[in-house]
């Protein structure tokens, strides 16, 4: 399964990067590919391309603040979770995403 992610916290530093790493590791451990766009005070890093969004099976948004340019995901299956939940158990949102796609 192709999973895309967005992580965002107010400053875009510790929580954003840690959640991105944990999500990617959990997805890959379950046999999925995943790319995560990290959003913070300085903008987006590893920005998702139009093609990546088009080809994705599901988008996981792990947020403490709103997602910038969320309209890019209209028509896609989107799972929104709290960034703190990802830090506690990154596999749980991956399993939820798998069930969303089924």
Image (cartoon, rainbow, N blue to C red):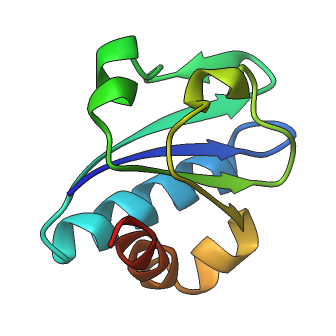
Question: Which residue extends farthest left?
Answer: 31
Q: Quadrant of residue 44?
A: top right
Seen in the image, is 28 located left or right of residue 18?
Answer: left
Image location of residue 23, percent across then percent down: 43, 63
The image quadrant where one finds the C terminus is: bottom left
Residue positioned 48% across, 78% down in the render = 96
Q: Is residue 50 above or below residue 66?
A: above
The relative height of residue 58 versus residue 6 in the rendered view (above or below) is: below
Q: Quadrant of residue 56?
A: top left
**x 43%, y 66%: residue:** 22
On screen, residue 66 versus residue 95, left or right, reads right
Image label count: 0
Name the residue: 40% across, 79% down.
Answer: 99
Residue 70 location, quadrant: top right
Query: In the rendering, at what x and y percent does residue 91 appear?
Result: 41, 82
**Residue 73 horizontal/vertical position (percent):** 57, 31
**Residue nearer the viewer, 100 or 65:** 100
Q: On the rendered image, what quadrant is the N terminus found in?
A: bottom left
Residue positioned 76% across, 35% down in the render: 67
């Amino acid at each position: 399964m192709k999973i895309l992610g967005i992580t965002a916290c107010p400053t875009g530093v510790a929580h954003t990067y840690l959640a991105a790493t944990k999500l990617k590791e959990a997805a890959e451990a379950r046999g999925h590919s995943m790319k995560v766009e990290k959003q913070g005070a300085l903008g987006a890093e590893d920005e998702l391309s139009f093609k990546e969004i088009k080809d994705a099976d599901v988008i996981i948004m792990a947020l403490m603040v709103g997602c910038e340019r969320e309209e890019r995901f209209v028509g896609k299956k989107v799972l929104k979770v709290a960034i703190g939940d990802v830090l506690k158990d990154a596999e749980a949102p991956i399993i939820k995403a798998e069930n969303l796609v089924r």
